[in-house]
Amino acid sequence: QTWSPLCSSTAALGAVSGAGHVNVTERTFEIDYQKDRFLKDGKPFRYISGSIHYFRVPRFYWKDRLLKMKMAGLNAIQTYVPWNFHEPQPGQYRFSEDHDVQYFIQLAHELGLLVILRPGPYICAEWDMGGLPAWLLEKESIVLRSSDPDYLAAVDKWLGVLLPKMRPLLYQNGGPIITVQVENEYGSYFACDFNYMRFLQKRFRHYLGDNVLLFTTDGAQKSFLKCGTLQGLYATVDFGTGSNVTADFQTQRKVEPNGPLVNSEFYTGWLDHWGQPHSTVKTEVLASSLYEILARGASVNLYMFIGGTNFAYWNGANTPYAPQPTSYDYDAPLSEAGDLTEKYFVLRKVIQMFEEVPEGPIPPSTPKFAYGKVSLKKLKTVEAALDILCPGGPIKSLYPLTFIQVKQYFGFVLYRTTLPQDCSNSTSLHAPLSGVHDRAYVSVNGVPQGILERASVTPLNITGKAGATLDLLVENMGRVNYGRYINDSKGLVSNLTLGSSILTNWTIFPLGTEDAVRSHLQGWGGQDAGCHYENCTDSSPNYTLPAFYVGNFSIPSGIPDLPQDTFIQFSGWTKVCKVSTTGLLHWFVSQAFTRLHPLSLPAASRSSQTRPTVLGSLSSLFLLAFLTFTSLLKPPYSPPPPPPGPHPL
């Protein structure tokens, strides 16, 4: 079977009949229920796959990561398709460059890897709102992941765009996709709406045909499988190293008495939460569990084989509210930067006990280069740049509006009002019922007062004169991606009270940081960076006013193969957004530990100097930085024990 990455995405893929070739009509992938196995072209088959999310790895590195996965002995890869990544605005679709999922799948096929596709529409994945687009929440009463007519209409339209692009890539059509998952761990969701699952099944069949193998994935518990499975969809389970392999596969057998054993998410590591230590799973424990799974003849997917990075604002969150950080390293066999780890080589040896592993050199870890320290120049505070950040002007409202209500799905919104009373003595400012989603930087006449957070109902004491300007810069730290609360509103979602008075008459500024930086960076260099109030300061014991900084670093000439990737460290910083020509990267520098953050420069200019910008505290690098709570930074962490139980994906 031959393959061209230039083949039409709308026409069926063909194969040349003859010696050494398999005709498309002869390509099959199916279940042998009598002998509890998969059949690929009529022959017994089991897959050993690994998860890689193309949306968490720069396109430049897709081939490198896929090759490393193949050389580890994997014969397949698994990936989600996040709806919000491809349709950020209703009817506006992105399928090029880093969004080119078709090319990614074609590339896997060229390298001899099969593909397990998980197109949702809900994916979880520690991804903002579980992959569902935030604009769905404009329908305030919408019930996500259910038979709600508004939700089904949006899903139907999306599937009508995505799935026809996937059909030519199916195995029976000459492509690499052997199985397609419907929804994701639906048994863990409160709705338990079988009509919704039947709707999805019909639409998948309509667009993909009757021959494709559709499946579901749920935690290996009876309660999860009760609502997550449906006749006509092959039920698989997921579990990690802390589980009993025999018991969990017996749970699968209760809903699938015959057919292959499949663990669709065998956890190589674990997710992180902002402010918490990095999660790890011991290599020897992982290897032992993988051996036990493979010894049973089961098919397995290693989740994750490479985690990658939550670029821009795409990280998700769990409840009680705890956002994931920018890094999605996951303690996977390939690091966030795509580097080989001890875990990679140990798992390769385990796989080699059961299947042939490709011979030849393994692609090395990508070279890194130390560019040295970057001196930063402060350009503007957010307050001083409002005319640029909010070119359409503010919105007036008696009471606060949410991000969705002002058409701001990600990033920051500035809420402004005036103090209705004299607060010469400290006066309590608070948001009942955790009404700040998710973090508000509070200032009065440009003087920092402190921070209000979603996870805390502790009020903030502020001072100021009647009529003084009260600003709350509210940050969306990531929408909940798992459970019943995925309809996660952002901004000030309830009224704020000052003392006993409800604050009213708000002026609301949706901030377009990325576009503003790209279009105005060069003109900011010589302008005033300070605040515009008399006798104000931009620092307090709690934090400094968020501001834009810029810095230059040099790429030495005369050294071959530059630029190379590097790591960037924000010592003493808590929040940073890097804005560059390739997009915005939102770093959560953890309160609990300091880590190095990979900075990919594969497409950087070959000139001797590059200029990033930073929003908050670092950048050419251009950074928007928040120098907050530096006293909370702690010494390096020690790894926690492996997480128990199934992964909430």
Image (spheres, grey):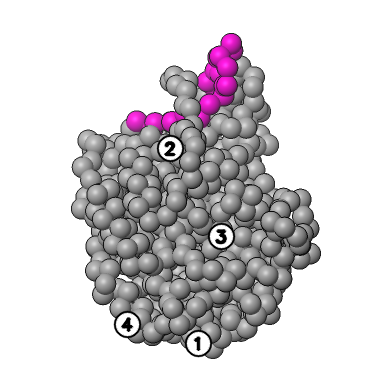
Residue density around tag 4, few if under 14, some if 14–19, many if 20 or more, within 10 Å:
some
Sequence order check, earlier mark of 2 and 3: 3
Q: Give the Cα separation between the discs numbered 4 and 1.
A: 16 Å
The region drawn magenta spans 552-571
Q: Which residue is mark 2?
A: 339
Marked residue nearer the N-terminal end (4 or 3): 3
Dot 2, how many residues are within 10 Å of its Cα: few (below 14), some (14-19), or many (20+)? some
Percent coordinates x, y for residue 543 in the rendering: 35, 39
Quarter of the image that includes the C terminus: bottom left
Q: Residues within 10 Å of mark 1 (few under 14, many from 20)?
A: few
> Is residue 276 visible in the rendered structure shown here?
no
Q: Which residue is mark 3?
A: 115
Q: Is residue 81 above or below residue 194?
A: above
Q: Mark 3 or mark 1: which comes first in sequence?
A: 3
Residue behind mark 1 = 231
Which structural element holds mark 2? loop
Q: Residue at x 39, y 31 (%)?
A: 569
Q: Secondary structure at mark 4?
A: helix
* Residue most extreme to the front: 19
Circle 3 Cα neighbour tier, 10 Å, few/some/many (<14 / 14–19 / ≥20) = many
Which residue was labeled with disc 4? 222
